[in-house]
Image (spheres, rainbow, N blue to C red):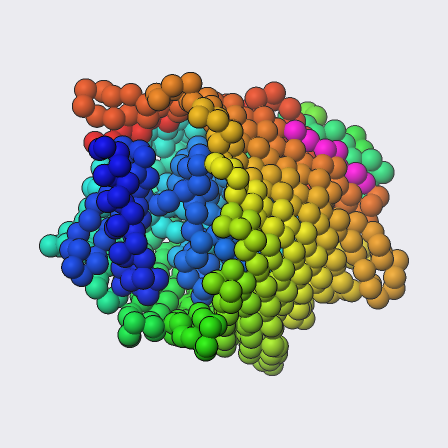
Amino acid sequence: MKKTKKKLLAAAVIYGCSFGAGHGFCTVEAADADRDDTVHVYDLPALTIVGERKITFAGDMIETKSTTGILGEKDSLELPYSVTTVSQKAIETFSSPQNGVMDTLSLVPSVRASSSKTVHSVTIRGFQQNGYSMYINGIPGAMSSGNLPYYWIENATVVSGPNLGVNGTNLSDAIGGSINFQSKRAQAKDNTDFRLSYNGGSAFEEGVDIGRRFGANKEYGLRVVANHIGGETVQENKDLTQNNIFINLDHQGKRSTTNLMLGYSRIRYEGGGDGFSVGALTALPKAPDASKSYTPSWLYHTYKDTWVILNHDQKINEHMKAYANFGYHRFDYDKYYEGTPKLTSNDGDFQINAEYWPLGHTRVYFGTGLRGDFRTGKVSHDYIIGVDKNWVNRDSGGDDLWSGTGNLYRSNAWPSVPLPDYKAPLQFKQQMTGYHIVDTMKFMDDRLQLTLGLHMHNSSYTRVRQKRQDSHATSPTFALSYKFTPDVMGYVSHSESFNAGTLVSGAAYKNKGDVLPPAKTKQDEIGIKIKKGDFVNTLSFFQIRKANNIDVERADGKYRTNDGQQKNTGFEWAFTGKLNDRLDLVGGLMYLNAKQAKTQNGTNDGKDVGGTSKLSGTVGAIYHIDPAWSLIGRVSYLGSAKIKNEALTVPSSWKFDLGASYETKMGTTPVTLSLMCYNVTGRDYWVPVAGSDGLQLSAPRSVSFTANFEL
């Protein structure tokens, strides 16, 4: 009887607030009435409700709703494209000290992590993107390109495919899809958490997470998250120091919601980066010991990020609300002494050409518009009318610093050299304005949905002491979905996007600093989403066509050029849920066929795009021994890939991670203890970088231990 009452109460609360939540003046985050969680309700007459936690699919690793930019929050099983929101539980369970939260995102089959200790980077459906292409709280380009810790992140949404149609204008085109990170916000239950972690090598982390709600109806929230990381990593002569603080303020009123995030991060990484380039080889050398360093210990990076991000929704009437989003992000790579080893022989010889290349950017974003609904006869419409604009000023420039040689299979040491120190000059300014109209029409009791969108863009690029370059484009979006049953939905979609041009960066290119012409991308997808009991499956086929940027070897060196078209065709299977009461699963696999086409001289037509594996997949599992003990496992596979126009093959690789967690109490304080071993077998292997001839070295075997105290 008690359980029945709980169910009725939860159902009444959710039903009574569902209309208001859809219009931005009421927030619901309900607990499962079958569990011991409590549903907190405030100010019922005014329908102001603050929930305990996000609603997730069985297994608690994937959330049922996804926040998708200009479209707002939607049920992920009803969205006509591939979208996955990984939960805070998944982020805490599967993120690693080496690749951070990007390791968790690789549970999504379209995503492959290619990060390092210094860089946030992934590939989505075979297209590389770094932090410049990612979002924070819906603001484009707000993520750092440096590798931030994940402690401040509430969840992360991966949209595979139609980025522009759902996220609005981004100067850095996210071709294969988009990633949006949501900052932690104060929940109904106050929290004071303290975290201690050993991250491998001699690196340790300390963090605090404090959340409070205030006001007569708990309408004001404050969340403060701060952490420090310091010490030598699992690679020799590579030291990491991080200091981060994020402050989130929110207000949930009767007619409006507002969220303000302030953030600051300062990071120093000593010992150089983790990437490799490849010269004129006839065979790829065997991967060396991943725990060793192959760059001078006196190379280092320091960078800092500052954020101000504001989101506001305002109810106008029962069927319309206005929204406004603002973002400011200042990124400074103020000390950048870097050299990438270039493999020059089959025996593992390499050459390093180090440079001092400070850079930075200031990004400002503003978007506003209207969201609402209306009816025409038996057809209901959900519409968005919006405009947004991006500004970016980029500072960049530097000099060659030093040259040296080494070998992968012997100890290397290089004497230090004097290091210059000056501020990077302004390199260019960019602006892009977007106009968006989207209408989702619902027929047959909402079972059949048709989405039509039109996105228009104007962009300008001004390089110092050069004439401004202007461009514009119109990009349509189309999607059709049909719900066969409440748990089975099929869809088909088409989207197009347009970038503002691509800056050539990296010391390896002779045309470093040039901007390649703007390029348009067209994407088509067909898929089906199936929920069967406690398990959810998404199957999708996709095709992406993009104007191609490739590496071209000329007599005087390597150039990055715009040549022809790249065509990526593939299949994805994503799944999440519970196989039984004890075993939770999440993961998937992707088949990808990425080809070059329509090149100017035709010599590369039909060849594999460098660094793209045809088959990849990840499975994460949590086995609950009892309510306190859980075993954690993950297996990742990356198929072989061709580089250097198919002249070299990067072998396939497997990686296994194992661990355990234990929930207990110290006195009256709940404590969660977690132990993880990454790359259990300790195997060394090369990791291809999609869309290039670059390589990364696998992370060595490492162990981390974390204790989280709920004070």
Q: State how many labels appear.
A: 0
Residue 653 is inside the magenta segment: yes
- Identify the residue at image location x=79%, y=30%: 347
Q: Is residue 306 above or below residue 89?
A: below
Left or right of 195, for residue 584: right
Query: Does 117 sit above or below residue 654?
Result: below
Residue 710 x/y as whole percent? 25, 31
Give the residue displayed 60% in from the left and 72% down from the top: 476
Q: Going 35% across and 45% down the picture, which residue do you hit?
A: 54
Q: Quadrant of the N terminus?
A: top left
In front of the other: 282 or 399: 282
* Left or right of residue 156, residue 604 in this image: right
The kind of secondary structure the magenta stretch mainly shows is strand
Does the stretch in magenta take in 610? no
Q: Which residues are magenta?
A: 648-654
Which quarter of the picture shows residue 404? top right
**x, y (%) of residue 23?**
33, 65
- Residue 646 vs residue 343, the one in the foreground: 646
Task: Identify the residue at horizontal 48%, vertical 26% (top origin).
Answer: 580
> x%, y% of residue 314?
29, 70
Residue 302 left/right relative to 684 = left
